[in-house]
Amino acid sequence: MKKLICFALILNSLSVFAGYQETELAQYADLAIEKKKYDSAIILLNALLKNYPDKEIYLSKRGAVYYQAGMFEKAEEDLTKVLTLSERKKEILNYLGLINYKKKNYAQALKYFSDGIDLYPDSFDGFYNRGLVYYQTGEYGLSEKDFLEAKKKAPDLIEAEYQLGLVCYQKKEFEKSQAAFSRFLEKKPDFAEGYNNRGLSYYASGLFDQALSDFLKAIALKKDEGVYYDNAGLVYLIYNEYEKAYELFEKASVLSPVFDKPYYHKGLIFYCQEKYQEAVQEYGKAVHLNNENGYFYNSRGNAFFYLNQFENAEKDYLKAIEILKNYSSAYYNLANTYDKMGQREKILFLYNQSISLNPEDGWFYHNRGRYYFKEKDYQNALKDFEKAVELNPADEKSLFSKSLVLFNLGNYLEAVKGFEYLFYQGSLKNLFEVDFQKDESLQKDYSESESIKKEIGFYLYLCFDKMNDENGKKSYQNFYNDKKRDSL
């Protein structure tokens, strides 16, 4: 090989090539291509084209070498010249498609691959490569169709299984995704990224034990990949095993110091532990590395919120909205912040915005209902609390609020139904605590108040009192007496 390189360098310095036969130069060029010595191959092919400019075989070979060397503009120039002349049209169309794929000219790449498929419908590579393009453009159904066709034409094309796993993951068809990755891993059991991606699919479908197992296998195969440690840490975070999670996130940040997610996830650990100042610091590191991630700002805003640093929280939520204009949780959190800041004139618009962006989140209706309740607009408050309960029947907080509104509207019988359900069957968690700020990664849970049952009993007494039901009043007389005594 050293002799080959020297030979190519000598050729490159000569202006005359007398004494060298075409076949000899071509053989050396093919050898350089085989050995992936692309610089030498280009020098040799340049020499051949200088002497034999009309031979498209050398032009097409040089185009292919330019592609392999990452010189896409030159590759496209060479290959376009010979596209209509070459007997190697299938190969050239494929290269031109790949060049445009690498350049992210997806429309042109699709054209080349589709032209190749039309001319050579029995070849797998056109379908496979077009599937790659459809994947990048988010057309996952078309991508899946092409990978399945490639697999049909080349049953041993294991890469098609891997791509099917990725496509089905994006389509949220997690069982199909896991099955495809499993078929791939049967053939390639030492491919760490395969385990990582199957682990992500397990994680997304809530199969956390399987996800953790795959992430740990990926780590065992490739110990220097920070993202694998970060993914494993997320499972431990879900399990509330904060020490193990932190250790893995720390390892990820050491291996990949410019990787933003481990710092963000360490922030989540501190947030779960109600160590909000530490959470702010870790979120800040993530923001420093990636100031275009709206979720980072939203989460740091949540930590500021619980530190009662509402102006800082406001700035972060506004930044999150600037980056992610359709991010419903940021509007919701900003509304809660303005509520704390006493800027109630800004609240209703933000709650309306969060609901319009995500009408299936019961918490948004709950907090807008609270706004209406404070404004004594009980009819609108009732509608929102009813919607919140409809969306989440286990939401005892909204059921309590609905019952309270019914009490204020004088509908005591319906109010009693809600209060008695909570009194006798409810878990009584979180009824009087501050509403948590919305976060994409977790929902904080707060301890219940010991006085909840007494409070509900007090309202039940008041309902029966308003209905002049003496038997009902007797059942809850003690709660009424306790409330009166506590108020003295």
Image (tube, grey):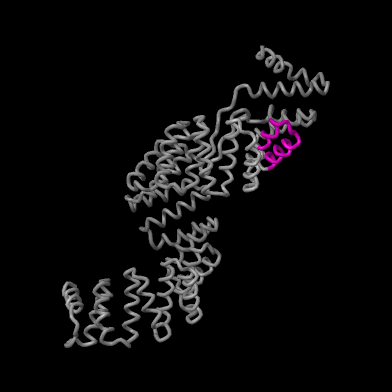
In what quadrant of the picture does the N terminus appear? bottom left
Decide: is 34 above or below 455: below
Q: How many callouts does the rendering have?
A: 0
Bounds of the magenta segment: 368-390
Decide: is 385 above or below 212: above
Answer whether residue 374 is magenta in the image.
Answer: yes
Of residues 117 and 473, the one drawn nearer to the viewer in this rendering: 117
**Can residue 298 be seen by looking at this rendering?**
yes
**For residue 16, what is the image quadrant?**
bottom left
Of residues 8 and 469, the one drawn nearer to the viewer in this rendering: 8
**Residue 461 located left or right of residue 253:** right
Q: Residue 49: x and y, percent?
A: 28, 83
Q: Is the magenta stretch mostly helix, strand or loop?
A: helix
Q: Which residue is drawn at 57% across and 43% down?
A: 329
Of residues 388 and 247, the one drawn nearer to the viewer in this rendering: 388
**Residue 37 located left or right of residue 413:** left
**For residue 412, what is the image quadrant?**
top right
Q: Residue 39: x and y, percent?
A: 25, 72
Q: Residue at x 39, y 42 (%)?
A: 249
Q: Residue 386: x and y, percent?
A: 72, 38
Of residues 206 and 39, the one drawn nearer to the viewer in this rendering: 39
Decide: is 366 above or below 225: above
Q: Which residue is drawn at 59% across and 33% down?
A: 435
**Can residue 394 be seen by looking at this rendering?**
no
Answer whether residue 71 is magenta in the image.
Answer: no
**Residue 358 located left or right of residue 22:** right
Q: Residue 174: x and y, percent?
A: 53, 55
In what quadrant of the picture does the C terminus appear? top right
